[in-house]
Amino acid sequence: MAISADSPEESRDLIRKAGLSYPLLSDGKAEAIRHYDLLCPGAGVDGRDIGGTAEFLLDPSGTVRWRSLNEANAEKFVEAAKTLN
């Protein structure tokens, strides 16, 4: 899943336009984005706040087991997931 600072309507439009196959959650108040210290104030269109790129891998209990605060890297994510057996 992904989390965006966009409104639910904007998130639905992005899912449709980009053909995403996973949920895109709306965090319009940026509460989760701030919690993980990923807020990029004024970095969006028209100076809107946006969330920075990050990946988190959680185990079934919700514990963060791996994270990447850079650009998405599917290969590293899959390797980290293999260690959760």
Image (tube, grey):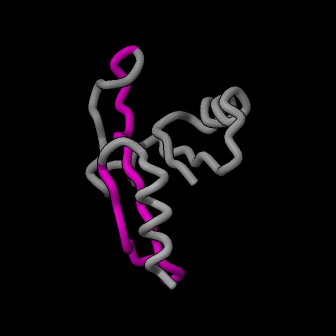
Residue for point 41% across, 54% down: 55
Q: Nearer the viewer, residue 70 or 13?
A: 70
Q: Residue furthest top?
A: 46
For this view, does 29 lie left or right of residue 18? left
Q: Please provide the residue range marked out in magenta.
A: 46-69
Vertical placement of residue 42 versus 35, above or below: above
Vertical placement of residue 7 versus 61, above or below: above
Q: Nearer the viewer, residue 83 or 27?
A: 83
Residue 19 horizontal/vertical position (percent): 71, 35
Residue 26 horizontal/vertical position (percent): 55, 44
What is the number of callouts on the image? 0
Residue for point 42% across, 69% down: 80
Residue 1 horizontal/vertical position (percent): 58, 54
Vertical placement of residue 42 versus 82, above or below: above
Determine the image quadrant of residue 70: top left
Residue for point 37% across, 74% down: 65
For this view, does 21 lie left or right of residue 39? right
Q: Is residue 30 magenta?
A: no
